[in-house]
Image (cartoon, rainbow, N blue to C red):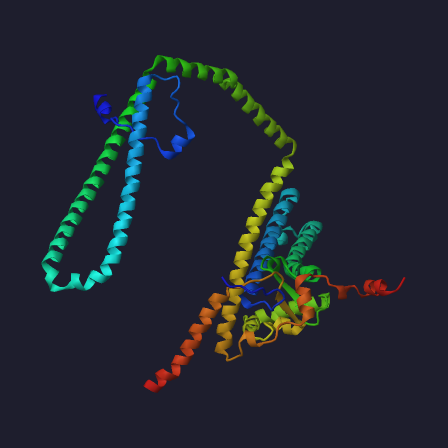
Amino acid sequence: MNQAKLQGEYAGFLSRTAAFVTDVLIISLVVIIVNWFVPVMISQFSLMNLDTCATILQRPLQYYTCRIIQISLFAFTISFPVLYTIFFWIIAGQTPGKYLFGLRVVRLNGHRMTIWVSLLRYLGYTLCILSLGLGFLNVLINDRRQGWHDKLARTCVVYAWEARQNVDLLEQVRYRLDRKRLKAPDQISDR
Amino acid sequence: MDERQNLLPTTVDPPTESLRESSPPEVEGRSAGAALRYAAFGILYRSVKRAQRRAGRVSNRVDNLSRMAAAPLKPLANSSLFKPIREQVDTLAERGQQELDRLIRDGQIGEERSRQISQKALNTVVGEVIGDISSNPQIQVLIQSQVEIMAAESPSSAQLDELVRKLADNYIDYLNEHPEQVQNLIAGQSLSLTTEIREEINERMVTGDSLLEMLARRLFRRPPREELPGPPPEVKARAAQVRIESDFPILKAGQDEPG
């Protein structure tokens, strides 16, 4: 297998999608566990059911406690993905998912990731999701393999490991595609 | 046994030159009959050698003479007058050659036969000797005594068992006292396997990246990735490590100051 090392080159769509899916799975797992574990523990120790806070209106203290816990859980569910992502981007330039697939988020000017840049990038994520993934698909055709979120935050994603690829396979595919393209005009002229 | 006796040579070859030089005959102290026999052999051997030498000389002279006579007699010999005589000589020579060929063939067959007979005799002798040795009670006693001596010198099965048990106990004690080494070994193996699997998956992902992009860029008629410039050096430097020198400008300035 003929291989070339690609460390520092722009990372492609498939690796980034895999890393993103891994992060989503990790976040979902943590959120689900916390949302299941906390109510169970509270119902065990305080005999209070978080799902039915409205039924204990006659006891104001318990009611407010119940409401605060509900809001906290909701806030955790909303904020955890943001905190998780931004925290890892700032300290390592890579979330656990990106670490697994050997990717790193880097600013185009080579400076460190800051909170502001990370927040902008996360906002870009939201835009990409709202556009039904079109912003992510931009990675496939952009010269720097940037999605909309990367454009917004002026970042890019690169291979952090000594990435290798199967050059032979790529050459074969390229050759077949070229042959098909060269054949097409002949077929038209034959007709 | 009788067959083997028949196969034994009835005549003795004369001693070779080297043998004669290395071991001179000692006639002193032997019987007169033996001395006479040796002398007869000596005379016979010397006569044969002389006869061979003389025959060689005669043959050389005849060759020289015939060579000298051949040149002047050649026109005469080739003439039609001598043709019947020439034919007779040729016929005689041909017959002589045939006789010689037959003798050579017989000699070859005889040599092969004699070799087979001697091989058979040797096999028979070896078989009988081995049979004799295996059934000889004295040999049995000798082997038995040797085995007893070796058995007395080597440790017994119980002693060996004890030794193995002791060694195994030592190993187990050592592993109990230093479990971290075994754990490190196992952990290292697992880690390397995990890393290998991860790298394999990542490699396929990178290939997939390039394939997908190639198709997409062709579809949108964009130039291929190979024709585009790579990332700037500062980005590449950041890819290898999350903290680079430019992150610590104050420290760097302090290091640059002299003194």
Q: Is residue B64 above or below residue A155?
A: above
Q: Residue at x 59, y 29 (%)?
A: B171
Residue B69 occupies which quadrant of the picture?
A: bottom left
Q: Relative to residue B147, is residue B66 drawn left or right?
A: left
Q: Relative to residue A156, is residue A166 drawn left or right?
A: left
Q: Nearer the viewer, residue A3 or B31?
A: B31
Residue B119 occupies which quadrant of the picture?
A: top left
Q: Nearer the viewer, residue B152 or B85?
A: B85
Can residue B39 be seen in this snapshot?
yes
Q: Residue furthest right?
A: B259
Q: Where residue A103 sits in the image (x, y, percent)?
A: 61, 62
Total numbered labels placed on residues in the image: 0
Residue A74 occupies which quadrant of the picture?
A: bottom right
Q: Quadrant of the C terminus of chain A?
A: bottom left
Q: Residue at x 21, y 43 (%)?
A: B104
Q: Relative to residue A9, is residue B93 drawn left or right?
A: left
Q: Residue at x 66, y 57 (%)?
A: A76
Can residue A107 be seen in this snapshot?
no
Q: Is residue B115 above or below residue A159?
A: above
Q: Where residue B16 sits in the image (x, y, percent)?
A: 35, 33
Q: Where residue B61 sits in the image (x, y, percent)?
A: 28, 49
